[in-house]
Amino acid sequence: MAGSLNAPSAGQRGSIGLFAGNGLTLESGGSLQANGAGADGRGGQLELSTVSGVINLNRGSVISASGQVQKGSLLLRAPAVVSTGMSELVPTHRLSPA
């Protein structure tokens, strides 16, 4: 995904879900934002999922679920690596809290 998806809210939580069959990539410049605005702002919920393949969060992409009252959440779902039984998570850049 190379564009922007915004689910702004105030006291309610915004929600964004991206689901893929064979890998999911958030390209550089791509943006997913579910921020809570104002003094009542509650961060939103983001879910990225793929049935097969991996989830790539490329350097320069933005994921945000901030809020004044409560922070949001990010859920990543990808298949386990058969040889280890673990999910493979290979960061391409450092994630830092908002």
Image: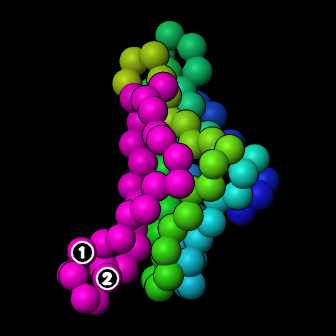
Residue 94 percent across, percent down from the top left? 48, 41
Identify which residue, 13 or 19, lies in the foreground.
19
Q: Is residue 11 magenta?
A: no
* Residue 38 disc label: none
Within-10-Å neighbours for mark 1: few <14, some 14–19, many 20+: few
Identify which residue, 57 or 73, lies in the foreground.
57
Residue with the most extreme top position: 39
> What residue appears at the point 31 percent right and 82 percent down from the top-left corner?
81
Residue 50 percent across, percent down from the top left? 49, 76
Please name the predominant secondary structure of the magenta segment in the image: loop
Identify which residue, 91 or 25, lies in the foreground.
91
Decide if residue 25 is in sight here.
yes
Q: Is residue 86 magenta?
A: yes
* Residue 86 disc label: 1
Residue 10 percent across, percent down from the top left? 55, 24
* Residue 81 disc label: 2
Residues in magenta, as a range:
71-98
Residue 72 percent across, percent down from the top left? 41, 36
> What residue appears at the point 57 percent right and 43 percent down from the top-left corner?
63
Decide if residue 43 is in sight here.
no
Circle 2/circle 1 CB separation < 8 Å: yes
Q: Amino acid at mark 2?
A: Val
Residue with the most extreme bottom position: 82
Which quadrant of the structure image shows residue 7?
A: top right
Which quadrant of the structure image shows residue 64?
A: top right
> What residue appears at the point 75 percent right and 47 percent down from the top-left corner?
29
**Spatial CA span between label 2 and label 1:** 5 Å
The reply, left or right, for residue 1 in relation to residue 96 is right
Instruction: Give the quarter of the figure containing the N terminus.
Output: bottom right
Q: Amino acid at mark 1?
A: Met
> What residue appears at the point 56 percent right and 77 percent down from the top-left corner?
23
